[in-house]
Image (cartoon, helix red, strand yellow):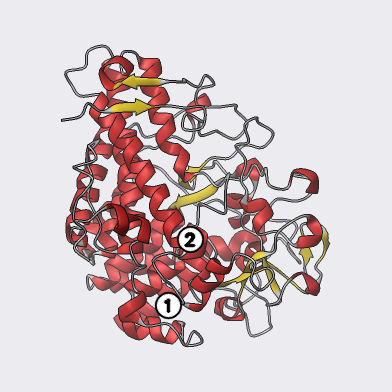
Amino acid sequence: MKRNHIIISAVTALLLTTAGCDNFLDQPVLGQYEAGQFFTSDTNTILAVNAAYVPLSFRDAGSNTIWVLGDVASDDAVKGSNPGDQADFENIDQFNITPINSAVEAQWRRDYDGIFKCNVVLDGVPESNTSISAAVRQQARGQALFLRAYYYFELTNLYGAIPLRVKVETPEELQSPAVPQAQIYAQIEADCQAAADALPTSWTGNDVGRATKGAALALLTKTYLFQKKWPQAAQTAQAVGALGYKLQPVFADNFRAATDNNQEIIFSVQHTTGLSPNQGSGLNQWFAPRPQNGYGFFLPTQSLVDNFERTSGGVVDPRLDYTLGRAGQSFFGVAFDASWTSTGYVSKKHLQPLTEVPATIKGDGGLNYQALRYADVLLMQAEALNESGNSSGALAALNQVRKRARESYLYDTSLPNAGTVPTGLLPDITTTDQGQLRELIRRERRSELALEFHRFFDIIRYGETYARQALADRPNFSYARNQFYPIPQSERDTNRNLGL
């Protein structure tokens, strides 16, 4: 048996940052260590935990392709930019997908790299390791368990049956078969439950942004939901709410750098501009219009725009203009230019004004990616209650989300005629017909979470009939073939026991 080694370089030890702070820890460790020699102090343990967060970052937005696989593949967005630019992303858009697609390869490598880093921590901090304080050991294990669950949740919903790796493996052990999705979900559930028991409800100071008990329970809620374990999902969502999360009065404050670590955010990928090495968000450049030194990718569709509700007098759900740029509306203080986009729209949720991040450093944004928001949990709670047969109970959670959306008019003075909610805008839902309510919850979820990289996963889990209707304009889409992405050729070539 070969001995396992940990390699921690200046790159893998890059630390996830917090808004307004420098780093979780500002001293990288270089070199090669045997596991028993590395996990000998609290400082080294925290370093290893920090490394496990790194694959979440959008510093390199072209290789963290969850935005392509999660939204460009959906009815909410198209690839954008020039034809042929990032051709493999365009192939995802058109469902011409092969195992050598670069987006498919990139996300697989990234998530399994995260899992490896989590396993390094978990192998290195058993109860028997008394070189580490009990508090740091518990928090390290909790964070690593949550992150491993997060990476596995992405992987199994992207690729279906996949290899399950829960320790640092030798090359021989890496020759492992894909296991059924149910087995992956069972591991995610176990990791989330253990993480929730180990993690604090909040962090302070430079540690803001680390995984919490609420993050573990929110991911557990989502895992139950995706398996249609409705009672468990509803109960766990309620447990998240009991921790004190609240919806922001103004929806857009979740997507503004000054307010993006707020009481609604359960877990976010932290970015900070102006650091060296770069720890900002590259999405700020990838999604911005070309005249602003952007690349012009990730363009919203007319189908998404049409999903947002309007009053009989034509007043639109304010989330529409918080989510995307369109003609006739200000785009971060400048006039919107139709030549920026082939669809008529530009994504906004992941962009910052030029007054915050000038064009010269466009790829170094300071805006977090909101991976889990309380609004998402409320909508999961509504869905789970409705599917459990408690449609009247589902209304309270659903209507909290709608109330916040319409009442942005009370708190955001930039909205026209602010201070008064327009008549007939986003009224409370009252129907308790399960089928009707199901469709209303799905529509609400699409508007609330638009362009946050969740839509394709929802389309698939809603089933073939829904998916075929949503993607009717994609002639190459086949539910049987495309509900999961192919396992990358690189894994097929190196792992002969996949059984494909």
Please state, as top left, top right, bottom left or bottom right, where the C terminus lies in the image.
bottom left
Q: Nearer the viewer, residue 53 or 108?
A: 108
Residue that badge 1 annotates:
440
**Residue lying furthest right in this view?**
335
Q: Is residue 68 left or right of residue 8?
A: right
The amino acid sitting under disc 2 is Ala
Residue matched to label 2: 103
389 vs 23: above or below: below
Q: Secondary structure at mark 1?
A: helix
Callout 2 secondary element: helix
Q: Which quadrant does the N terminus fall into? A: top left
Which residue is drawn at the image coordinates 22% and 13% (left, top)? 130
**Place of residue 420 in the rendered image (x, y in percent of width and height, measured from the top left):** 68, 65
- Please tell me which residue lies in front, 85 or 469: 85
Q: Residue at x 36, y 78 (%)?
A: 437
In the displayed structure image, the side of residue 309 where residue 267 appears, left or right:
left
